[in-house]
Image (cartoon, rainbow, N blue to C red):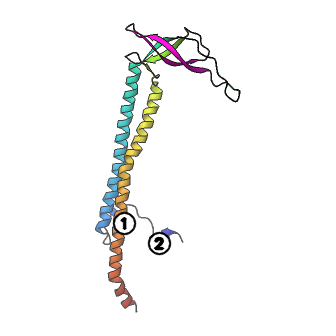
Amino acid sequence: MPLQAFRGPRVWLWRWRRNPLKRRADTVEAWVLLGACLGTVLAGVAAGLAAARTVGHALARERAERRPAVARVTGQVPGPRAAASGTPAGDRGWATVRWTVPDGSAHTGQAWVAAGAPAGTPVTVWTDPQGRLVTRPASPAQARLGAGLVGGLVGVAAGGVPCLMGLALHGRLERYRMRQWDAEWARLGPQWRRTAG
């Protein structure tokens, strides 16, 4: 037999309606659930938007600060190595490169270049304002996607806190209500047995 048959028809917003059988715990539970729902939505949206905005600004700052520079390979890059299976391991490898920053100072570092490239081969590298090698900045589309993903994850995590707190408090109220019910039944149950006999 389905559980719905024991509970009766579902009545929406029953905790907010006037009812002589409604207890104080029912009213408290209604406010707890409303607060948990509002807290979940508000905390999730606020934290998600703040995180997305922060990530978006950081990635935009990286795009503004990082500049491409032409570097030259300083020595012969080894050709592709064969893997154990006999297939090439890849057509790129690490090599030492040298580049000059706008103030005229020369820098060297490791860059990912085509395998077998001879010395002097030009390679595009990305540098920070101090001329150090950095990764290529995210494109505007990649930045929007990354900011959206981070914002969504942070929003879900932040919204989960009030949701879990509301569920925990709802569980405590439910146990309290069951204890009250047991106490009332222990008090009134023997009276019903006397009148039934």
Marks 2/1: CA–CA distance: 18 Å
**Which residue has dot 2 on it?**
6
The foreground one among 87 and 178 is 87
Question: Which residue does the image show at 59% across and 15% down from the upper left?
Answer: 77
In the rendering, at what x and y percent does residue 59 appear? 40, 27
Q: Which mark is residue 160?
A: none
Label 2 sits on what residue type?
Phe
* Start-end of magenta stretch: 91-118
| Residue 88 placement, left or right of 113 | right
In the rendering, at what x and y percent does residue 179 appear? 34, 72
| Residue 157 sits above or below residue 10 on the image | above
In the rendering, at what x and y percent does residue 177 appear? 34, 69
**Which residue has dot 1 on it?**
174
Provide the secondary structure element on which disc 2 rests: helix
Residue closest to the far bottom: 197
Quadrant that contains the C terminus: bottom left
Question: Which residue does the image show at 30% across and 62% down from the upper left?
Answer: 28
Foreground: disc 2 or disc 1: 1
In the rendering, at what x and y percent does residue 25 appear? 30, 66
Quadrant that contains the N terminus: bottom right
The foreground one among 153 and 140 is 153
| Residue 101 sits above or below residue 13 on the image | above
- Per the picture, the main secondary structure of the magenta-coloured stretch is strand
